[in-house]
Image (cartoon, rainbow, N blue to C red):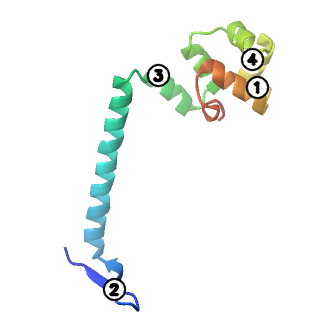
Amino acid sequence: MNVQIIENKSGNPAYAVVPWDEYRVMVDRLEELQDIVDADKAMADIDDGGETYPSELVERLVRGDNPVRVWREHRGMTTAALAAAAGVTSSAISQIEGGKRGLSVELLKRLAEVLRVGMDDLVD
């Protein structure tokens, strides 16, 4: 590797300059290493009983389907069951899922707890 070291006024190394092509190779290798670390962590989480998600669920979320509806259906809940668990009416859940009603922070928090997801998973 062709590296140029630039020293500060005290004579200590301050910067390392590498050719662009070598820099890109280093970045690519670091990204591959991070992918391996992330995959190992995900596999360990699964081995420890962590939840996995079917591609259908992910596709619906990516497509922009209402996340409250997607997670409710994934959890096998009816609108009535979700409403009762969150302390609102079935009509409120239907309006939220239809995009006719927004979510207060408090309701968002309750829905996230009931659906066992993060609050950010329920907002577009």
How crowded pointer 2 is (Cα within 10 Å; few <14, some 14-19, many 20+) is rated as few
| Marker disc for residue 40 | none
Q: Which of marks 3 and 2 is nearer the N terminus?
A: 2
Is 91 displayed left or right of 67 in the figure? right
How crowded pointer 4 is (Cα within 10 Å; few <14, some 14-19, many 20+) is rated as many
Mark 4: which amino acid? Answer: Ile
Could you give the CA–CA distance between mark 2 and mark 4, rounded to whole angstroms? 62 Å
Mark 1: which amino acid? Answer: Leu
Residue 94: x and y in percent read 75, 16
* Quadrant in which residue 86 is drawn: top right
Foreground mark, 4 or 1, reads: 1
Could you give the CA–CA distance between mark 2 and mark 1, rounded to whole angstroms? 56 Å
The residue that disc 3 covers is 56
Q: Which of marks 3 and 1 is nearer the N terminus?
A: 3
Residue occupying image coordinates x 36% and y 36%: 41
Q: Which of marks 2 and 4 is nearer the N terminus?
A: 2
Of residues 48 and 110, which is closer to you in this image?
Answer: 48
The residue that disc 4 covers is 93
Residue occupying image coordinates x 76% and y 25%: 107
Is 63 displayed left or right of 36 in the figure? right
Residue 7: x and y in percent read 35, 87
The residue that disc 2 covers is 6
Foreground mark, 3 or 2, reads: 2
Residue occupying image coordinates x 78% and y 14%: 87
Could you give the CA–CA distance between mark 3 and mark 4, rounded to whole angstroms? 22 Å
Vertical arrangement, residue 44 with respect to residue 4, above or below: above
The answer to whether the residue labelled 2 contacts the one labelled 1, judged by CB atoms less than 8 Å apart, is no
The residue that disc 1 covers is 107
Vertical arrangement, residue 74 with respect to residue 12, above or below: above
Could you give the CA–CA distance between mark 3 and mark 1, rounded to whole angstroms? 26 Å
